[in-house]
Amino acid sequence: MPGCGFITCCVKKKGLETCAECGDWEECERVAKLLDSAKYKDSFLSHRPLAANYAFIQKYGIEEFARLEMEKQRFLRDLIKNYDA
């Protein structure tokens, strides 16, 4: 199974939970390639807001980011549940 360069650098080498916690993510070659790819040929939508998500996590922390993501999930579940109600 191939290794993940992001996990190797961020988690294993630096002991971080996410690249967003790294002070060097804006200069990171791996992140830059992913961001560039997301602009032109990425069909996996969750990569598109990567830079904004990283900046949010750096400013407010991963706990606040996770809380907001859970709030979005609850909202979407309610929309789906009540779609044909």
Image (cartoon, grey):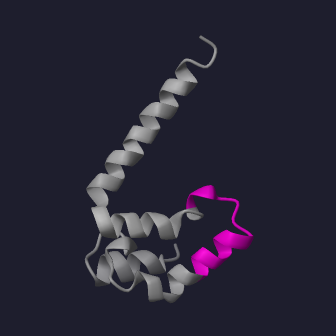
Q: Residue at x 70, y 60 (%)?
A: 43
SS majority, magenta: helix
The percent coordinates of residue 39 (x first, y second) are 68, 71
Q: Nearer the viewer, residue 74 or 3?
A: 74
The percent coordinates of residue 46 (x first, y second) are 56, 58
| Quarter of the image where the C terminus is located | top right
Task: Please tell me in which quadrant of the rendered image residue 20 appears.
Answer: bottom left
Tell me the magenta residue range.
33-46
Q: Nearer the viewer, residue 28 or 16?
A: 28
The percent coordinates of residue 10 (x first, y second) are 35, 78
Count of marks, rendered view: 0
In the displayed structure image, the side of residue 71 where residue 43 appears, left or right: right
Q: Is residue 83 magenta?
A: no
Please say if 78 is above or below 26. above
Q: Residue at x 27, y 55 (%)?
A: 63
Q: Residue at x 36, y 69 (%)?
A: 18
Please say if 80 is above or below 39. above
The percent coordinates of residue 77 (x first, y second) are 49, 29
Please say if 46 is above or below 70. below
Q: Is residue 42 magenta?
A: yes
- Residue at the top extreme of this rendering: 85
